[in-house]
Image (cartoon, rainbow, N blue to C red):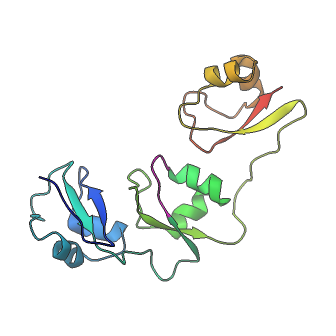
Amino acid sequence: MSVSCPPGSSRYFIGAGDTFFSIAQRFNTTAAAIEAVNPNANPNNLVVGSLICIPSGARPPSTCPGRVYTVRSGDTMFAIANTQGVSLAALEAANPAVDPNRLSVGQLICIPTGPAPGPTPRPCPPNTTSYTVKAGDTFFTLAQHFSTSVEAIRRANPSVDPNALQIGQHLCIPR
């Protein structure tokens, strides 16, 4: 069955463990508002992968200590923190109702303003260049692209797990 959402609302795919209440918390709306725009959905029998509509006006709390950001395809909390210049801890603290493992395209989150607590990325040492990890990057593909070796990238980034690269992560690539 195809779901056509009212103007100004957004589509959302039901995930494992979702309830109207948990979805409402994530989008800072109410279960009743979600039910109102989804009259054919049974809130007691949500099917993983089915589509519902999230009512317009679903926003982060008015107590957002910063600006609002709309989650895009491929975003992670780590990548958003890096691209928005805040620490992951500050981003998570500003969005306590957001499950960082279940971001949804179109979801609104709060980007805190002010100095980011915690360590800032270290500058790259001489003879290296700064690089921001993109989707699909591995140490091997980066080594090929920058005409260096995987081992050289490892030495330049001793605290980075090459098997757990995150989109938006900062690396130093040997020249």
- Report x, y in % for residue 171: 71, 37
Q: Left or right: 144 with respect to 6?
A: right
Taking depth in this image into account, of 14 and 6 the one nearest to the observer is: 6
Q: Residue at x 57, y 49 (%)?
A: 79
Residue 35, image quadrant: bottom left
Vertical relation: 130 (above or below) 59: above
Taking depth in this image into account, of 93 and 104 the one nearest to the observer is: 104
Is 150 in the magenta? no
Q: Which residues are magenta?
A: 70-75
Q: Left or right: 66 with respect to 59?
A: right
Vertical relation: 129 (above or below) 108: above
Residue 84, image quadrant: bottom right
Vertical relation: 75 (above or below) 61: above
Q: Residue at x 68, y 59 (%)?
A: 85
> If the image is split into quadrants, where does the C terminus sit?
top right
Vertical relation: 154 (above or below) 86: above
Q: Residue at x 61, y 45 (%)?
A: 168
